[in-house]
Image (cartoon, rainbow, N blue to C red):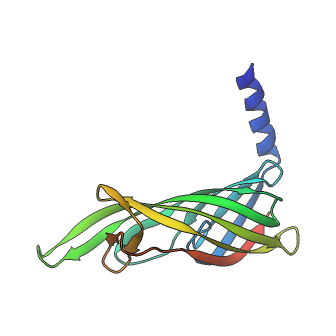
């Protein structure tokens, strides 16, 4: 019986869902561009996004979830998980080495909707990477190397359009 009730609540929340697209500068919850679906009276959001382009990276994208305390206008907390794959040239072996990393970001943001459909956001967080048999706090985008020597706090701001 509990599963039936949860399923009905899930179906009802999808019925009141809202779709949006976004573009941003920076790489936190929203990524560079993507699409977002907001559920549960604008309190829960999920997105698919693309992080950008680099010639050494074959794919840089992922998904994120956010809990919005006051709906679309106001603060939110988020988590995003992204896959980065590509190749870098290893001069010692004269060949390209492949890499696959998971990028995980936890953080918070603030969004303001000017109208029902148009808004802006600012967000920041803490990122870390899983790859090469461990967890790291920094990725050198130029050589694809992971490190624990530095910490990166990604920030982003951007524009969102809701439908």
Tell me if 25 is positioned left or right of 19 in this view.
left
Compare residues 78 and 61 and report the one nearer the observer: 78
What percent of the width, then of the height, locates residue 11?
Answer: 76, 37
Q: Quadrant of the N terminus?
A: top right
Q: Quadrant of residue 155?
A: bottom right
The furthest residue to the top = 1
What percent of the width, then of the height, locates residue 118?
Answer: 81, 73
Tell me if 132 is positioned left or right of 76 in this view.
left
Tell me if 79 is positioned left or right of 9 in this view.
left
Residue occupying the point 78% across, 51% down: 17
What percent of the width, then of the height, locates residue 72?
Answer: 80, 63
Disc tally is 0
Q: Quadrant of residue 5?
A: top right
Residue occupying the point 83% across, 59% down: 70
Residue occupying the point 48% across, 74% down: 152
Q: Quadrant of residue 24?
A: bottom right
Compare residues 112 and 58 and report the one nearer the observer: 112
The furthest residue to the left = 93
The furthest residue to the right = 115
Residue occupying the point 83% across, 48% down: 16
The furthest residue to the front = 149
Depicted 115 relative to depicted 36: above or below = below
Compare residues 135 and 55 and report the one nearer the observer: 135
Q: Quadrant of the C terminus?
A: bottom right
Tell me if 162 is positioned left or right of 123 in this view.
right
What percent of the width, then of the height, locates residue 109?
Answer: 69, 68
């Amino acid at each position: 019986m509990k599963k039936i009730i949860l399923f009905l609540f899930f179906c009802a929340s999808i019925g009141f869902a809202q779709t949006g697209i976004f573009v941003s500068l920076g790489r936190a919850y929203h990524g560079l561009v993507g699409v977002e679906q907001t559920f549960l009276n604008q309190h829960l959001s999920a997105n698919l996004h693309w992080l950008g382009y680099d010639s050494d990276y074959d794919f840089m994208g992922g998904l994120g979830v956010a809990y919005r305390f006051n709906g679309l206008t106001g603060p939110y907390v988020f988590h995003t998980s992204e896959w980065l794959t590509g190749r870098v040239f290893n001069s010692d072996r004269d060949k390209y080495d492949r890499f696959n990393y998971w990028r995980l970001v936890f953080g918070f943001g603030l969004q303001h909707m000017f109208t029902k459909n148009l808004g802006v956001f600012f967000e920041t967080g803490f990122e870390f990477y899983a790859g090469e048999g461990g967890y790291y706090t920094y990725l050198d985008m130029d050589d694809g190397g992971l490190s624990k020597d530095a910490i990166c706090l990604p920030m982003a701001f951007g524009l969102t359009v809701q439908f």
